[in-house]
Image (cartoon, coloured by chain):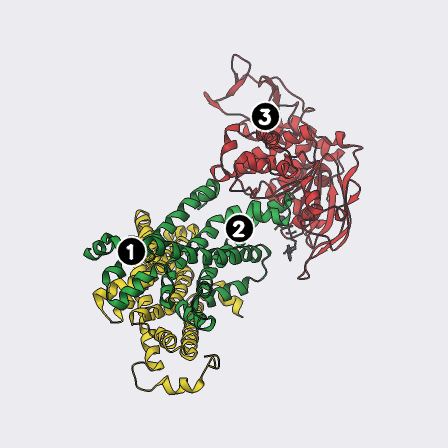
Amino acid sequence: MSWLIDFFGNAANWSGPYGIPVRLLEHLEFSGVAFLIAALIAVPLGMLTGHTGRGALIVVVSANAARALPTLGLLVLVVLLAGVGTAAPVLIPLIVLAVPPILVNTHEGIRGVDPDLRDAAYGMGLRGRQVLFRALVPVALPLILLGLRLAAIQVVSTATIAAFVGLGGLGRFIIDGIATKTYADVIGGAVLVAALALAVQLGFTLLQRVTVSPGVRNLR
Amino acid sequence: MKSEPLIRWDWITRNWDNGSPSAISTLLESHLLMAFVPVLLGLLVALPLGLACARWPRLYQPTAGLVNVMYALPSLVLFSIFLSVTGLTPATVIIPLTFFTLAVLIPAVVDGLASVPDHVRQSAVAMGFRPLRRLLQVELPVAVPVVLAGTRVATVSSISLVSVGALIGQGGLGELFMDGWQRQFYTPIIVGIALIVLLAVLADGLLVLAQRLLTPWSRAWRDAR
Amino acid sequence: MTTTRRRRRDQNDGTKSLIIFDGVTKRYQDGTVAVDDLSMEVPGGAITVLVGPSGCGKTTSLRMINRMVDATSGRILLGGRDVREIDPATLRRGIGYVIQHAGLFPHRRIVDNVATVPYLLGWNRKKARARAMELIELVGLDPKLATRYPFQLSGGQQQRVGVARALAADPPVLLMDEPFSAVDPVVRTGLQDELLRLQSELRKTIVFVTHDIDEAIKLGDTVAVLHTGGRLAQMAGPATLLSEPVDGFVREFLGRDRGIRRLSFISAKDVRLDPAPADLAVGGDDRPIGLRVDGRLVPYGTFDPESDSMRAALDAALLSPDGTAVAVDGDGRVLGVATREALDAVLRKYAGGLPDQRAPADQRAPADQRAPAGEGSPA
Ligand SMILES: Nc1ncnc2c1ncn2[C@@H]1O[C@H](COP(=O)(O)OP(=O)(O)OP(=O)(O)O)[C@@H](O)[C@H]1O
Ligand SMILES: [Mg+2]
């Protein structure tokens, strides 16, 4: 507890280029960018494979393989290969981390929609894309959002290790704290990251409330 | 640096089993320990807890909330918190990873039991199964595929997450990443990644096999032929 | 239930065939021939029912009309045009389609579900919703349900919404694939009656798939019986079908109650009525209360000779303790009683008058003794 007071009570931690606000922004920046890129890749791909039914096996297998890739190892390798200094290499392992849950959940969500519903939609004269966006996506939305949420949380929490290769973000407090045995910084940074992850969780819960139709929410 | 090859095979043979605490085989062993113990512990806790949640639905909401919080905590954060408690021991990695596997396994057990069709449950009741026997002989077997699917995710993730422990000095194969990073040397990093992926694929394969043996009636079995 | 519906066949006379199957064959990718060289003409403005055993190609035939499935060979003409020349989505917007579990959009309120096709056709929201509300009432749903989501409705209500949705853009053709088979018999009867009522107002060309022969007889102006393997076995009006099945397959499919079912098509208005006996207790408004037997009032069966069939009259006779059916008028007032002899006279006349091979005595034989001997068994 006293560590928390040491950390959050220290005025120096709240300002300047190494202060909490700056670190928080850095953290949000690269986790946000990585998450967006992953979503832009995985959501359309998952919709495509789920809707057409083609490539289902590839989706599942590659998603599983991607899950097995150790983020830290990938990060270190990519940064060594690309050279230290820019933020871009950090994005790659985070994207690799975020794509599988989004892809699998989107794919399963779309594919799992009641075939009767799909049938009725085509039968009424909706075209392929209309069937996807007016019937399948709204019904699959809870699962798609679940995938996005899991990915966002993993990205936000894993982005801490970016500090290990010299980048900023909240991980700095933790990594530097471990190096200098300043436990107040380690715990303080840990609490900040956890709070951020919980905020993401909360954000998605709210998003779900707003975007998912009550008719779908109560299906289960 | 530019002339450095991606892989130096001689480094691998020299360091595979050289007796030092950083020999690859030693790291592999500790990696296995730190990856599998959390899955076993997770199953031991998640099964009864999941059953309880299925039995008393009121327990589910608070448990789900707790599980979500556990999932949201970065492994590095938990590692560093436990570092101050358990010090530089495997427990520092094992305990936080157990929380992580629980976050995956509890929902899997609950969903698995929920996936037992109502008519199956009802007919078991009607045939005179008492609750415990019904659970063991009807509901758990039907839930196995879902629980095993969760176990696969937990196992694969656990194997890959152990390596993060390297940042606090307990990372199994992850320590190869630190080594390679410090010496700007690709080989250990690639070896580490390859071994971890290999382990994950093997473990996943074994679990798929286990599922086929445990649930010969499921469709996965038929598809395989 | 046992009343004769006013047949609408007379009004269909002269209506041209709206849908023509011309040598249509469907072979699925795995080689299954679901429909084999099917040729038939579906009359416009009437209900045509496709029946047949499971897997005989009913659904496939139906879905080829709105191109949910494309025929392998042959043509399907809709109003003279080959459906394959029409863009599938455009075609489908002009054809109502109702399926077994309704297939409602769970994320949309009932009113928006019903307005789906109007929205697709680009109607403005207000007009589409007004039309949807009209239809919700037309199919006999409480308008209060309009703002609910599908999961808040019973199965029967959902099915009504499915019908309303199919009718929303006022398509001339309605395809219905076992629309009522997922609801219980009481609700199903209600839905069938509702469909007949709607049809008497709307006069759509309806193709209706079922494997329930009773439903087919009740709803169909024309009934097409399909063989396994998707060949047409017989296509005829229900009365003709019952009295003149073309082969053993159709006979077997119609079931052993074929004779009894035929009675639904014979009016009870020719039954000779005798004055009501003294032991029929009649209330102040001339309505029967019961029969006095040993000082107790026992329930009785009634029929209305004007609107009921011989099946209803016979049913009433079987329900009464003394075997006579009480005839009542539209308001329930007693007109007289029909004795078993009077009923038999009518049965004798029709059994001889209609080209049916059965001896009159057969009609009265208990169901389990009725000779399957001459009926033959199907291949
Ligand atoms: N997509 C498909 N691919 C291959 N075969 C199919 C397909 N759809 C239907 N069939 C086969 O075609 C035949 C006719 O099927 P169809 O669905 O038209 O039958 P049905 O008369 O509607 O049966 P039911 O009363 O059971 O609904 C069956 O043997 C069926 O197995
Ligand atoms: Mg069918």
Q: Nearer the viewer, residue C212 or C80?
A: C80
Residue A191's disc is: 1
Where residue A62 sits: x, y (%)?
Answer: 50, 66
> According to the rendering, which colour does chain A have?
green
Q: Colour of chain B?
A: yellow
Disc 2 vs disc 1: which is toward the camera? 1
Quadrant in the picture for residue B177: bottom left
Looking at the rendered structure, the kind of residue marked 1 is Val
Q: Please give the residue where the numbered disc 3 appears in the rendered image.
A: C324
Discs 1, 3: same chain: no
Residue A38 versus residue A204 in the image, above or below = below
> Residue A52 location, x and y as percent?
60, 56
The one nearer the camera, B83 or A148, is: B83
Work out which quarter of the rendered image holds the C terminus of chain C and state it. Answer: bottom right
Whether residue B44 is visible to the viewer of this picture, yes or no, is no
* Chain of the residue under label 1: A
Q: Element at badge 3?
A: loop
Disc 2 element: loop
